[in-house]
């Protein structure tokens, strides 16, 4: 196992590569293997050029990516990441999300975050914690009902005639408005192939009424489900 603490820190006055090499030695690597593993970890996060730099001279985003090297050194089967993108600008946050997505293909990553949109983008399974208790666990599809719900945001309000046409369709179990420009369409599907039919029908109906979707997402937002499960109140303002 390996881990990235939320507030990982480095010593000043010591080159980054030497500190990462020490982490590798603490993980049981001999000296040559530790130096190689540290260099490979820096390559993985796209920062081979900072190897000999003082960690305190790095930007916050670069330092966060260097900190991620602690978790990526070696060949851990289980990796714990605690708020790996907290405080990062969008570009560096995207870089770390891409790394996590690539790395999770052949190992287990435990990803702890308050950014529920990010969790929904990255994770296959989710566990919701509230006041120290496990409230619900399952696959992302199970928690967000991805197979039976579409979330739609339009360029202008949903016309009553369009809403009536959608509601009357046999593939639709109901339409629920979230706000002036967004609504949820609950699906009535007998098999997975009907999801494509439902999507085509949605675009056809909206197009006939001069409406254009700015976004169409499958499943409830994890934020909405989190608030529902923990007793909060969802106001339709989900960031996802």
Image (tube, helix red, strand yellow):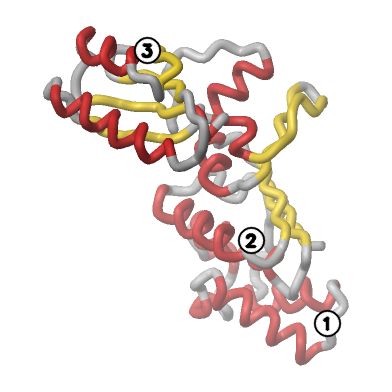
Q: CA distance from mark 1 to mark 3?
A: 57 Å
Q: Give the left or right position of residue 25, taking residue 158 as reference.
A: right
x 63%, y 75%: residue: 41
N-terminal label among 1 and 3: 1
Residue 93 x/y as whole percent: 48, 51
Residue 127: name its quadrant: top right
Say which mark, if any, is on residue 122.
Answer: none
N-terminal label among 3 and 2: 2
x 31%, y 26%: residue: 153
Residue 173 x/y as whole percent: 45, 17
x 22%, y 15%: residue: 162
* Nearer to us: label 3 or label 2: 3
Residue 53: name its quadrant: bottom right
Asked if residue 150 is positioned above or below residue 23 in the image, the reply reads: above
Residue 55 x/y as whole percent: 59, 66
Q: Give the left or right position of residue 120, taking residue 33 as reference.
A: left
Q: Nearer the viewer, residue 18 or 180?
A: 180
Q: Nearer the viewer, residue 118 or 51?
A: 118
Q: Give the left or right position of residue 22, taking residue 177 as reference.
A: right
x 20%, y 10%: residue: 161
Give the residue at mark 3: 177
Residue 19 seen from this side: no
* Nearer to us: label 1 or label 3: 3
Residue 116 x/y as whole percent: 56, 35
Mark 1 and mark 3 residues within 8 Å of each other at the beta carbon: no
Q: Residues within 10 Å of mark 2 (few under 14, many from 20)?
A: some
Give the residue at mark 1: 29
Mark 1 element type = loop
Q: Quadrant of the C terminus?
A: top left
Say which mark, if any, is on residue 104.
Answer: 2
């Amino acid at each position: 196992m390996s881990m990235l603490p939320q507030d990982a820190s480095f010593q000043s006055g010591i080159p980054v590569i030497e500190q990462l090499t020490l982490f590798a030695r603490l993980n049981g690597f001999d000296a040559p293997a530790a130096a190689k593993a540290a260099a490979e970890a820096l390559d993985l996060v796209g920062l081979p050029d900072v190897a000999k730099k003082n960690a305190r001279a790095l930007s916050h985003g670069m330092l966060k990516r260097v900190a991620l090297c602690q978790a990526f050194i070696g060949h851990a089967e289980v990796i714990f990441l605690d708020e790996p993108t907290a405080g990062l600008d969008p570009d560096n946050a995207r870089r770390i999300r891409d790394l996590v997505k690539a790395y999770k293909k052949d190992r287990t990553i435990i990803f702890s975050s308050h950014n529920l949109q990010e969790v929904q983008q990255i994770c296959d399974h989710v566990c919701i914690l509230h006041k120290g208790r496990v409230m619900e666990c399952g696959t992302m599809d199970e928690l967000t009902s991805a197979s039976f719900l579409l979330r739609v945001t339009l360029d202008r309000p949903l016309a009553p005639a369009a809403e009536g046409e959608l509601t009357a369709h046999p593939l639709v179990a109901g339409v629920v408005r979230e706000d002036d420009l967004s609504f949820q369409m609950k699906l009535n599907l007998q098999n997975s192939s009907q999801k494509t039919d439902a999507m085509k029908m949605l675009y056809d109906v909206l197009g006939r009424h001069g409406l254009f979707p700015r976004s169409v997402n499958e499943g409830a937002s994890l934020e909405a489900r989190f608030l529902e499960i923990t007793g909060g109140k969802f106001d339709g303002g989900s960031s996802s």
